[in-house]
Amino acid sequence: MNEKQFRRWAKTRQKGRTHFIWVRGVLICGVLATVLNLFLWSNNVSPLLAIILVIIGCICGYFWGVWMWELIEKRYFKYMETKAK
């Protein structure tokens, strides 16, 4: 992590873990990616299948958000430690 990433993450983490997971994980990664893939790769998708895929995408996005939060937090605190030395 460099200084620019450190400052950007400091602003992001002020909004909180829950906000990060729901906005970046569920909405952006989960819903948006699933909807874009449905439009790009599928010509004949039933509404029920589309709903199921969006739900699966949201669940995956949630876990991606949790994983990314933890990963970046570790890097953030490691950078803070090295910066303090």
Image (cartoon, helix red, strand yellow):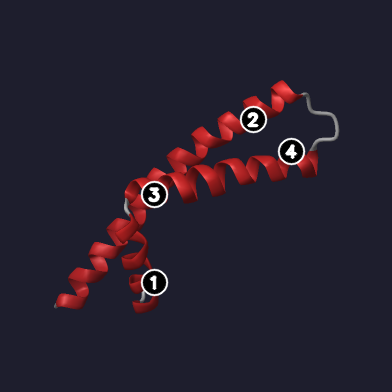
Q: Is disc 4 surrounded by few (<14), some (14 to 19) or many (20+) residues within 10 Å? A: some
- Disc 1: which residue: 5
The disc at residue 19 is: 3
Residue 7 lies, in percent from the top left, at: 34, 73
> Looking at this rendering, what residue extends furthest in the left direction?
85
Q: Amino acid at mark 4?
A: Leu
Quote the CA–CA distance across marks 4 and 1: 33 Å
| Label 3 SS | helix
Residue at image x 70%, y 24%? 49
Q: Amino acid at mark 1?
A: Gln
Residue 1 visible, this orientation: no
The quadrant in which the N terminus is found is: bottom left
Q: Amino acid at mark 2?
A: Leu
In the rendered image, which quarter is residue 48 located in?
Answer: top right
N-term-proximal mark, 4 vs 1: 1
Q: Are marks 3 and 4 in contact (CB under 8 Å)?
A: no
Q: Are marks 2 and 4 in contact (CB under 8 Å)?
A: yes
The disc at residue 66 is: none
The disc at residue 38 is: 4
N-term-proximal mark, 3 vs 2: 3
In this rendering, the answer to whether 55 lies above or below 65 is: above
The quadrant in which the C terminus is found is: bottom left
Q: Amino acid at mark 3?
A: His
Residue at image x 22%, y 70%? 80
| Label 2 SS | helix
The disc at residue 53 is: 2
Of tags 1 and 3, which is closer to the observer?
Answer: 3
Residue 47 lies, in percent from the top left, at: 74, 25
Q: Is disc 2 surrounded by few (<14), some (14 to 19) or many (20+) residues within 10 Å? A: some
